[in-house]
Image: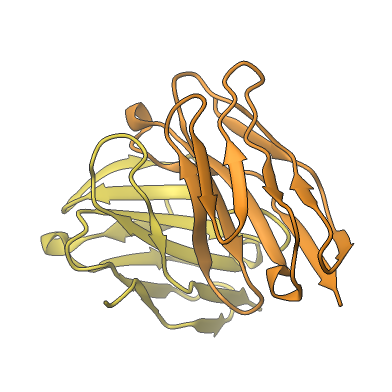
């Protein structure tokens, strides 16, 4: 079956530091890949997505590249802000499986001023 | 632009009681998904609908759980004879089926506590 593995947190950073959250996946077909973010007290929001190999998703200064050869979709941001403190979830979906999302366990990120 | 809404936001119940949650998707979306999220974990798929048809149910969805989407609009998730292990956040998401990579938009969730 499909699965997503992401680095465990919490990750604690200072403002303006570089952030990387590793995500690898196992899928039976050709999945689409997503990063969702959950800010404190709020619901899940889509941060970015990529639907095929070598695609780069980007939003709000975050980027992730779909790497089929390493089955990875690592999230990066060059300079984090306190407002980026949240829980980040990597996920995949497959068209042949009704596009239901399979999530990783989430990575809590805390950015200190 | 109205997003996905869920009602109630919080529900506290005693073990053995029945509970029902409601989800209203984004109006033009034809797919609706239910997920369950326990503390410190990622959401897990429960079931999904395309229009009014329930197309898949996870093994997580025991026979105490039932979901409906009459007329392909709002959906309800009912849990009968609740157990303490049912305590979780129940999330609803909707999407417009476009093929691969359609984006799911999530509601705020219903937090269930079973005493």
Q: Residue furthest top?
A: A69
Residue B66 place in picture, x, y as percent: 35, 57
Residue B82 place in picture, x, y as percent: 53, 68
In the image, residue B59 sits, relative to residue A77, either above or below, namely above
The total number of labels drawn is 0
What colour has chain A?
orange
What colour has chain B?
yellow
Q: Which residue sits at x=32%, y=58%?
A: B94
Q: Residue furthest left?
A: B71
Residue B85 place in picture, x, y as percent: 65, 61
Q: Which residue sits at x=81%, y=53%?
A: A18
In the image, residue B20 sits, relative to residue B53, either above or below, namely below
- Identify the image quadrant of residue A68: top right
Name the residue nearer the viewer: B77 or A60: A60
Left or right of A61, for residue B17 = left
Q: Which residue sits at x=56%, y=68%?
A: B89
- Identify the image quadrant of residue B98: top left
Residue A110 place in picture, x, y as percent: 81, 67
Name the residue nearer the viewer: A96 or B18: A96
Left or right of B94, for residue A42 = right
């Amino acid at each position: 079956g499909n699965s997503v593995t992401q680095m465990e947190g919490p990750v604690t950073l200072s403002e303006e530091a570089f952030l990387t959250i590793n995500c690898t996946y196992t899928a039976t077909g050709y999945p689409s890949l997503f990063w969702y973010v959950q800010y404190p007290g709020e619901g899940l929001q889509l941060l970015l997505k990529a639907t095929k190999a070598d695609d780069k998703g980007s939003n709000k200064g975050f980027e992730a590249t779909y790497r089929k050869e390493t089955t990875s979709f690592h999230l990066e941001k060059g300079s984090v802000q306190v407002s980026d403190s949240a829980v980040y979830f990597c996920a995949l979906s497959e068209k042949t499986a009704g596009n239901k999302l399979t999530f990783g366990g989430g990575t809590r990120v805390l950015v200190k001023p | 632009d109205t997003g996905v809404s869920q009602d109630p936001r919080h529900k506290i119940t005693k073990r053995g009681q029945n509970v029902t949650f409601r989800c209203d998707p984004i109006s033009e979306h034809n797919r609706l998904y239910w997920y369950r999220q326990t503390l410190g974990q990622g959401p897990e798929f429960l079931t999904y609908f395309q229009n009014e048809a329930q197309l898949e149910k996870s093994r997580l969805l025991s026979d105490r759980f039932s979901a409906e989407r009459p007329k392909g609009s709002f959906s309800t998730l009912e849990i009968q004879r609740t157990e303490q292990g049912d305590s979780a956040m129940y999330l609803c998401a909707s999407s417009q089926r476009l093929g691969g990579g359609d984006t799911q938009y999530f509601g705020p969730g219903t937090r269930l506590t079973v005493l």
